[in-house]
Image (cartoon, grey):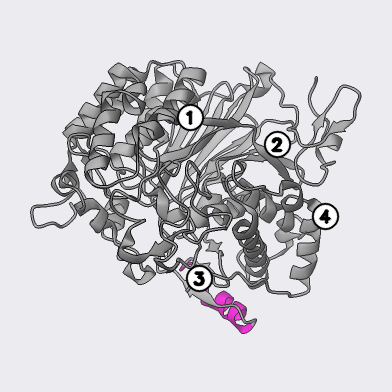
């Protein structure tokens, strides 16, 4: 099959993107044909590009490319390093997702390696202990923080399985070689960067949650590794060495992921949880599998958009884009009051639908056709034009315990990888060096809801690794972000900044933005007060962040005429590096 004609790309049926078939008709619910011609996919002058939230991670990825590795090798090398140098954001005991596009091999799929509730978890285990919910809807609060910190908080880890499955099936390098930069940094030490210290010292008690320093101090390893003798977190410029983590990564380099999921390391993990009354069992670890799925598809102004299916955030992203394309945004003042009002209402509708309909599809019937209907998006746009305000109820803050890496190589292979600890549990098994995820506070502790706890269930996630294709079917924008429920709003604005307002990749990720997951419009401090004043005059509650670069942290690669350009969000410490 040849290249998809432009005329066909604009004929999207409601819901998922159709694919051309031999007789010229369109089959519902599939992806467009993606050209695999070397002439189309070869990138100019460079081996590739890596954009990550940590300079050490970008460096590890670029070195993998320079050694002849592909985008998958580079992404996994960067991911392992991120778990060392940003230990509250991610690690091998976290969870995540990645989109992989390999045009020459005809591969385009998502790997999802979300943490799962242990099989011993019960739907009603905290039903009588509910305290509330964060305003952004990301976490649920229960008495004594039992779902937030300690041995009841972790779910079955997925990151290591996801990294190694991707490397085995799509990479070219050996696991030991890919792990080497992470091992060296864990043993020799990394320098505390400004954003790391900012996060470690964050005061989030007003949200009802514990502070990051509480997670750092929870275990003996955490206190000894990340804190000074007086219990304070190490400061910018100080060196952090984690020899226990280095030894764990070396064991994995020798024994592969099975040592973690069923071997001697698994036995050490389970023994620790058993001693402390945790839920995680050897059966949970042995039974863990990485899931694979096709992307869910939509479009924005004729550009195909491939993103993550439920329980990820891709449906919400497509919903927002499908509404926004009903407006001539380029004719508006960027970040003017009317522009922000349209954005806010589109985001509110997506948040409302996520709460009501989106969950783990193995446990919840997600109505994709309804949620992604272009006709429904038109109706939502009409209500926005009429001035209707959507109400997003929350039970009476935003955790940022996530990170991201985006990679493209000279063959046109693209990877967008988001991974996290969710909310860090604070638990580090003596001698192992890595912290476990805090999955369980993302489940709704009230029984009978789409996001309720169930054995083996994955929680709803805002992770959203995304690729926007040009009208010839080539990657135009590869992007993703950390930032909990701010991820989807940030990605939607970045895509619009490039396609509607003609911004460069870096301009698009660095532009001031908003985040809306409740009735309140959260705004960056660089949004002018005369703009927010106009919104407040229309009856919108507005919350101004003290941060200049607020709400998620987009890391993107744009491609124009075969040339890559990168943008690392200035909110974090990251960088875009070319090989």
Magenta stretch, overall SS:
helix
Image location of residue 494, percent across then percent down:
58, 51
Disc nearer the start of the sequence (3/1): 1
Residue highlighted by disc 3: 395
Q: Whole-Å distance between the Cαs marked 1 and 4?
A: 37 Å
Dividing the picture into quadrants, the one containing residue 433 is top left
Disc nearer the start of the sequence (2/3): 3
Q: Is residue 489 visible?
A: yes
Disc nearer the start of the sequence (2/1): 1
Query: Which image quarter holds the N terminus?
Result: top right
Q: Nearer the viewer, mark 1 or mark 4?
A: 1
Q: Label 3 neighbourhood size at 10 Å, few (<14), some (14-19), many (20+)?
A: few
Report if the CB atoms under discs 3 and 1 are less than 8 Å apart: no
Q: Is residue 184 visible?
A: no
Disc count in the image? 4
Q: Nearer the viewer, residue 504 or 536?
A: 536
Residue highlighted by disc 2: 470
Image location of residue 7, percent across then percent down:
86, 37
Q: Nearer the viewer, mark 2 or mark 1?
A: 1
Report if the CB atoms under discs 4 and 2 are less than 8 Å apart: no
Q: At numbered mark 3, what does the secondary structure look like: helix, strand or loop?
A: loop
Residue highlighted by disc 1: 289
Q: At numbered mark 2, what does the secondary structure look like: helix, strand or loop?
A: loop
In the image, the segment drawn in magenta is 525-537
Residue 535 lies in the magenta-colored region: yes
Up-down: is 191 above or below 165? Answer: below
Report if the CB atoms under discs 1 and 4 are less than 8 Å apart: no
Residue highlighted by disc 4: 375
Q: Nearer the viewer, mark 4 or mark 2?
A: 4
């Amino acid at each position: 099959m040849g290249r998809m004609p432009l005329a066909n790309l604009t004929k999207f049926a409601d819901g998922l993107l159709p694919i051309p078939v031999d007789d010229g008709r369109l089959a519902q619910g599939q992806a467009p044909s993606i050209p695999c011609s070397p002439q189309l996919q070869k990138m100019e002058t460079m081996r590739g590009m890596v954009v990550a939230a940590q300079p050490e991670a970008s460096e590890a990825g670029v070195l993998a490319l320079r050694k002849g590795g592909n985008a998958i090798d580079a992404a996994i090398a960067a991911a392992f390093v991120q778990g060392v140098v940003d230990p509250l954001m991610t690690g091998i005991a976290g969870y995540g997702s990645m989109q992989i596009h390999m045009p020459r091999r005809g591969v385009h799929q998502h790997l999802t390696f979300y943490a799962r509730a242990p099989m011993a978890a019960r739907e009603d285990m905290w039903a009588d202990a509910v305290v509330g919910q964060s305003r952004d809807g990301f976490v649920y609060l229960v008495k004594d923080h039992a779902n937030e910190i300690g041995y009841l908080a972790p779910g079955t880890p997925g990151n290591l399985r996801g990294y190694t499955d991707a490397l085995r099936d799509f990479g070219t390098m050996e696991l030991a070689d890919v792990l080497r930069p992470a091992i060296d940094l864990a043993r020799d030490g990394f320098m505390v960067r400004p954003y790391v210290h900012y996060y470690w010292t964050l005061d989030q008690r007003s949200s009802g949650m514990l502070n990051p320093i509480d997670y750092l101090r929870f275990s003996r390893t955490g206190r000894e590794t990340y804190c000074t003798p007086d219990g304070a977190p190490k400061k910018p410029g100080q060196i952090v060495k984690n020899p226990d983590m280095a030894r764990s990564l070396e064991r994995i380099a020798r024994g592969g992921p099975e040592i973690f999921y069923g071997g001697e390391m698994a036995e050490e993990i389970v023994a620790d949880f058993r001693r402390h009354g945790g839920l995680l069992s050897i059966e949970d670890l042995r039974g863990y599998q990485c899931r694979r799925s096709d992307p869910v598809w939509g479009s924005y102004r004729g550009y195909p958009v491939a993103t993550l299916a439920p329980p990820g955030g891709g449906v919400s992203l497509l919903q927002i884009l499908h509404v926004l394309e009903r407006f001539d945004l380029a004719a508006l003042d960027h970040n003017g009051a009317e522009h922000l009002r349209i954005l806010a209402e589109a985001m509110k509708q997506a948040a409302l639908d996520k709460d009501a309909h989106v969950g783990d599809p193995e446990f919840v019937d997600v109505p994709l056709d309804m949620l992604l209907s272009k006709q429904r998006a038109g109706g939502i746009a009409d209500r926005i034009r009429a001035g209707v305000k959507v109400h997003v109820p929350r039970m009476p803050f935003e955790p940022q315990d996530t990170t991201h890496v985006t990679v493209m190589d000279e063959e046109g292979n693209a990877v967008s990888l988001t991974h996290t600890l969710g909310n860090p549990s604070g638990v580090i098994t003596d001698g192992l060096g890595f912290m476990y995820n805090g999955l369980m506070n993302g489940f709704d502790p009230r029984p009978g809801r789409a996001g309720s706890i169930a054995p083996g269930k994955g929680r709803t996630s805002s992770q959203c690794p995304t690729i926007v294709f040009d009208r010839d079917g080539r990657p135009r924008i590869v992007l993703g972000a950390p930032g909990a429920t701010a991820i989807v709003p940030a990605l939607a604005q970045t895509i619009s900044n490039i396609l509607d307002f003609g911004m460069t990749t870096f301009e698009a990720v660095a532009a001031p933005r908003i985040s809306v997951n409740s009735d309140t419009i959260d705004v960056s401090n660089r949004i002018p007060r005369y703009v927010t004043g106009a919104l407040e005059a229309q009856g919108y509650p507005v919350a101004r962040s003290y941060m200049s670069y607020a709400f998620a942290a987009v890391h993107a690669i744009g491609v124009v005429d075969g040339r890559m350009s990168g943008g690392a969000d200035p909110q974090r410490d990251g960088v875009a590096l070319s090989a």
